[in-house]
Image (cartoon, rainbow, N blue to C red):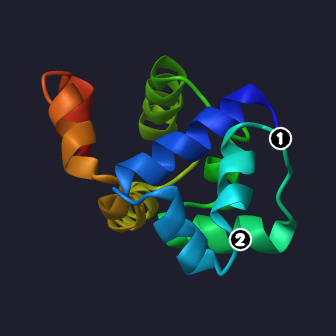
Amino acid sequence: MDYIITEKLKELRKSKKITQEQLAEKLDISRSKVSSWETNKRDMSITEAIKLANIYEVSLDNLFEINRITEEEYIKISDKFLKGKDIPLKEKVKIIELLKDTLKQNNINEFYENYKDDTKCDKIV
């Protein structure tokens, strides 16, 4: 694991307001193992990664920050999606509704509040 991932592991645990000890109990492992992940002294198995992702309610790619994009890239992709003619409006609405349902766990309201002044976002929601 690299430095970015170890920071992400700490950040996710703290955002759930659980200690290393509590996380270790949930995973049925030692607290020192959790600590070793967060200090980049030990790698986790895929089974442990899956369990951890489930506890944090994130996907594995989110857990390990695979294909992470910036907010600017996200907005550019969203804009291209909304203006694109290759997907019918009805399908776009269905996709957006699915995204809203999925993102509720990750606080879409906070995301929307950050961008509600942007007229493009007003058209989305």
Which residue corresponds to the image point at 48% horizontal and 41% vertical from the top-left?
11
Is disc 1 placed on a helix, strand or loop? loop
Q: Nearer the viewer, residue 93 or 63?
A: 63
In the displayed structure, 109 sits above or below 91; it is: above
| Quadrant including the N terminus | top right
Residue 50 in the image: state x and y as whole percent: 71, 71
Amino acid type assigned to the residue bearing label 2 in the image: Ile
Residue 39 is left or right of residue 11, and the answer is right
Residue 18 visible in this rendered orientation of the protein:
yes
Residue 38 is left or right of residue 98, and the answer is right
In the displayed structure, 93 sits above or below 12; it is: below
Q: Are marks 1 and 2 in contact (CB under 8 Å)?
A: no
Examine the image and state in which quarter residue 104 appears: bottom left
Q: Nearer the viewer, residue 81 or 104?
A: 104
Residue 57 visible in this rendered orientation of the protein:
no
Q: Nearer the viewer, residue 89 or 55?
A: 55
Amino acid type assigned to the residue bearing label 1 in the image: Lys
> Rounded to the nearest whole Å, what is the CA distance between mark 1 and mark 2?
19 Å
Residue 51 in the image: state x and y as whole percent: 66, 74
Q: Nearer the viewer, residue 83 or 60?
A: 60
Which residue corresponds to the image point at 61% horizontal and 61% vertical from the top-left?
59
Examine the image and state in which quarter residue 58 appears: bottom right
- Most extreme residue toward the top is 72
Query: Circle 1 sits on which residue?
Result: 41
Residue 72 is left or right of residue 67, and the answer is left
Query: Circle 2 sits on which residue?
Result: 50
The disc, 1 or 2, on the residue closer to the chain's N-terminal end is 1
Residue 28 in the image: state x and y as whole percent: 65, 81
Residue 98 is left or right of residue 115, and the answer is right
Residue 60 in the image: state x and y as whole percent: 69, 59
